[in-house]
Image: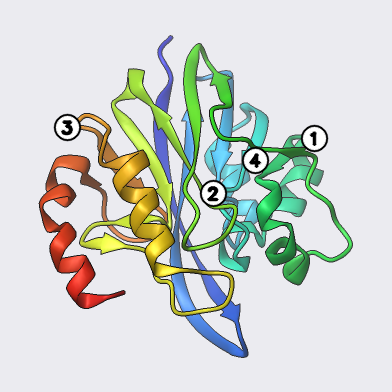
Amino acid sequence: MTARVDHLVTSGTFSLDGGTWDVDNNVWIVGDDDEAIVIDAAHDADAVLAALDGRTLRAIVCTHAHDDHVGAAPALAAATGARILLHPADQPLWKLTHPDHTPDGELADGQVLTIAGTDLKVLHTPGHAPGAVCLYAPDLGTVFTGDTLFQGGPGATGRSFSDFPTIIESIRERLLTLPPETVVRTGHGDSTTIGAEAPHQGEWLVRGH
């Protein structure tokens, strides 16, 4: 059976630099009827468990370590035995949320994760966070971008651990080089495509996210 993508939205808060905001997060589940991985265990471990519906969870992959994306990761790992995977450059952010829990493994640029016979290639895309990654699944025609690229432009870079020129370089070099029909599944909000976002690079620079 070919892997499929299931989508869940969970709600909670994002806190950094002394501020807290209400947010809705996309949780992506990639797998088949038997096994799956979760991309970003956001806010509600019980809701993610229900969406898994008894499937074996092989890994919890963190696109970055902002608290709204990793808040439920330890609880989900404890309930399933799945390993938490994070790029090492995001360890300082992770420790802000989970100082007493260490991720189980590291993500590296070019690494390939395989689930239900489908490969997902790790693309290190710093800018929104130092260890931000995207996951490209060519067989599914999709890329999971976390908070690196949204419908309408790059992720925010106005808070600590982020950098606007870096995120623009990451998007240009790692994402806009993908096939234009590639579906962009984001960390928040609606999906888009590489082809829909590519023409707007100049606007991003003017806006200076």
Q: Determine whether 56 is above or below 208 in the image.
A: above
Q: Secondary structure at mark 4?
A: strand
Mark sitting earlier along the chain (2/3): 2
Q: Which residue is mark 2?
A: 63
Mark sitting earlier along the chain (1/3): 1
In space, the residues marked 1 and 4 are separated at their CA atoms by 10 Å
Mark sitting earlier along the chain (1/4): 4
The image shows a total of numbered marks equal to 4
In space, the residues marked 4 and 2 are separated at their CA atoms by 10 Å
Mark 3 neighbour density, 10 Å: few (under 14) some (14–19) many (20 or more): few
Extreme bottom residue here? 18
Mark sitting earlier along the chain (2/1): 2
Q: Determine whether 190 is above or below 162 in the image.
A: above
What is the number of the mark on residue 81? 1
Residue 27 visible in the snapshot: yes
Q: Quadrant of residue 206?
A: bottom left
The residue under the point 32% across, 32% down is: 142
User: Disc 4 or disc 3, which is closer to the eye?
Assistant: 3
Q: Determine whether 56 is above or below 150 in the image.
A: above
Q: Which residue is mark 4?
A: 60
Q: Which residue is mark 3?
A: 181
Mark 4 neighbour density, 10 Å: few (under 14) some (14–19) many (20 or more): many
